[in-house]
Amino acid sequence: MTFESLGLHPLVLKALNDAGYTEPTPVQQQALPAAIAGRDLLVSSQTGSGKTAAFMLPSLHKLANVPAESTGKTPNQAAQSARSRGERPRFMPARPKMLVLTPTRELALQVTTATDKYGVHVRRVKAVSILGGMPYPKQMQLLARNPEILVATPGRLIDHMESGKIDFSALEILVLDEADRMLDMGFIDDIERIISKTPETRQTMLFSATLDGMVGNMARRITKDPQLIQIASAATRHENIQQRVHFVDDLSHKNRLLDHLLRDTNIDQAVVFTATKRDADTIADRLTIAGFAAAALHGDMHQGARNRTLNSLRRGQVRVLVATDVAARGIDVPGITHVFNYDLPKFPEDYVHRIGRTGRAGRNGIAVSLVNHAEGVHVKRIERFTKQPIPVDVIEGYEPKKTAAPARRPGWRPGDGRGGKPGKPGQRSFAKPGGAPRKEGSGYRSERGSRGDTRRG
Ligand code: AMP
């Protein structure tokens, strides 16, 4: 299947050509024909699958074909002509044709950037982000341009909607991106309120890691005869990402091991996930003192500081980003070769999202979790969810005192590095704590050459 064969608008095809996209990804292959035909969509697909283009390309196609608004004037132009007549400008609300709701500011900005890229030749169609943390006057300026596309987080959008700055009566397309996460974050009432102000005739596309439970209920309420597309569940196998667990005895052991792992010369860029914002700051400071180009990213930082950090990451000036889940969601930087879980996430779904920060754009990646002995049960939950065993690894000089070796050696050979394959399904991934420490090395890439085969017995 090619993009041309789908009948996309020539200006959209031109942008895809500029971007170097040669063929649609699997989610795009299923979503594009249905969305172009005007169907509602319910899509569960993994992050990094090309889902943004899956909803944005058909929307731009549609908006590029729609004639401009009959009024012809943006609120800015209307205000100017009122002033030239010596009248006080009458406030005109923005009347977007498309709304994309996202759980986080980062994802909203990423969607807006992608929209600018895919819509670069559809000049008449403008997209703006309406986000919490952005100054109101700036947002009022953006809304006054009467953009066709709004990309927004629900809370701030409600403020503008309820104060009459946005009118959704002309809305044609509604997208809920990462709907499961929006519900996890407690946005259900806001989402329902926003949807109640949009026309019944709209096209609705919902993207989510899962379509079960609460998301499924909401999806049924807000879509009409939707096309169901399930590319991979949230428990996606991430087969291009090697996963491993290191057991640690205590915090000092964990910090020493992290410092050692981060010195692996195979790391281009890494994300270290922490459970708390405070830890993100503390660890970033500690790593900076230790000589790493490290920076923290979390929800307590001002939007400007978050954007600066993300830009430095994209430019490669930050090599180690220490982040919390919400702040790091949606980060799409191809240079990220490694993800480290300094703390395990609360939910297995978050583990899948975290490790998906590496192995982007068809590359390989490595995901390493540093786990206390008591957290073995959480690793098992993650393994059950992803249906993949996570091999335990041990590095010479950093052996935990309390942990047993894996019942079987990991599914890759030492020195395999990023090209190796994860353990086979059904393989025992880690033994119960309390056994004899493993003497031999880890097979971790940084240790390559320091020992021979790690095969036991
Ligand atoms: P997403 O899942 O929307 O976050 O997209 C993941 C990455 O895939 C982004 O960097 C996109 O630019 C890229 N991408 C999306 N569609 C295609 C395509 N058809 N061909 C190549 N890359 C793509």
Image: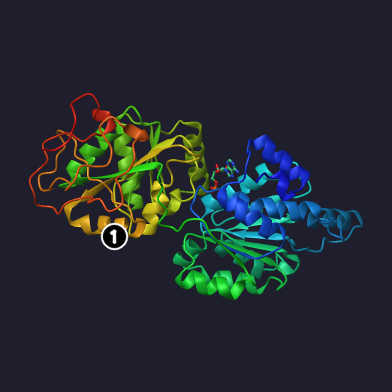
Instruction: Locate the C terminus and report the quarter of the image it occupies.
Output: top left
Judge from the rendering whether residue 376 lies leftward or rightward of residue 43; answer left or right: left
Identify the residue shown where x is 75% and y is 62%: 95
- Tell me what residue is drawn at x 85 percent, y 53 percent: 80
Q: 9 or 105, which is in the foreground?
A: 9
- The residue under label 1 is 381
| Mark 1 neighbour density, 10 Å: few (under 14) some (14–19) many (20 or more) | few
Q: Is residue 214 left or right of residue 375?
A: right
Near-viewer residue (282 or 205): 205
The front one of 388 and 457 is 457
Q: In the rendered view, would you say 230 is above or below 217?
A: above
On the image, the x and y values in percent for residue 68 come to 84, 55
Q: Residue furthest right?
A: 85
Q: Residue furthest left?
A: 436
Tag 1: amino acid: Arg
Residue 16, position in %: x, y? 67, 40
